[in-house]
Amino acid sequence: QVQLVESGGGLVQAGGSLRLSCAASGRSFSSYAMGWFRQAPGKEREFVAYISASGVRTYAAFLKGRFTISRDNAKNTVYLQMNSLKPEDTAIYYCARGAYYRSTYSSAEQYDSWGQGTQVTVSS
C-alpha cells in the first residue's frame, strides 16, 4: 500500500501560477509512472498529465503548453507546474500512481493508487 499526499493548491488570479506537489510513501517510487487528474464539481475526473518511469511526459490537449509535470525520484515526489491559469482550471487536483507495465497512462483505469486531492481555485 502506498500513500500519496498532494499539496500546493490554493487561490490564484487568472494568469497566475501554482506548483503542486505529490509526496509518495514507500519504496520503488522510481519504478512507477505518476499522473495528475482533476475534477470540478459535477464533472467527471479528467486526465491532466503523466510522466513515465523513464521520464517521458504526456499532456492533455486542453493544456496547450501551460502545465509541466516533473518528478524527483530522490524525494519520492512528482510536481505539476501550472502557468497562465484560467478560471476553467478550477478543480480538485489528484495525484495518482500508475499500475505496473501499462503502455499508456491517460485514463484513470490505468492507475492503482490515488491521493486525497488539493483544491485549485482560479479567480477572474
Image: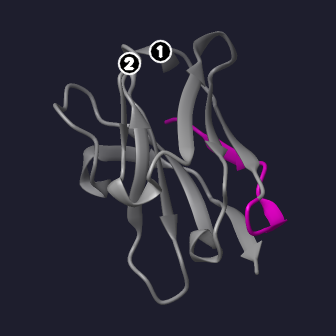
- Quarter of the picture containing the C terminus is bottom right
Q: Residue furthest top?
A: 74
Q: Which amino acid, by three-letter code, is at mark 2? A: Ala
Relative depth, front residue between 99 and 59: 59
Which class describes the residues within 10 Å of circle 2: few (<14), some (14-19), or many (20+)? some
At horizontal 62% and vertical 58% (from top left) the residue drawn is 116
The residue carrying mark 2 is 53
Q: Give the range drawn in magenta.
A: 1-15
105 falls in the magenta region: no
The residue carrying mark 1 is 30
Query: How many labels were placed on the picture?
Result: 2
- Classify 30 as above or below 47: above
- Residue 99 at x, y percent in the picture: 29, 35
At horizontal 28% and vertical 48% (from top left) the residue drawn is 106
In the structure shown, which secondary structural element does the residue marked by tag 1 occupy? helix
At horizontal 25% and vertical 54% (from top left) the residue drawn is 109
How is the protein colored in the picture?
one colour
In the structure shown, which secondary structural element does the residue marked by tag 2 occupy? loop
Q: Is residue 43 left or right of residue 69?
A: left
- Residue 47 at x, y percent in the picture: 38, 57
Q: Which amino acid, by three-letter code, is at mark 1? A: Ser
- Classify 117 as above or below 6: below
Q: Which of marks 2 and 1 is nearer the N terminus?
A: 1
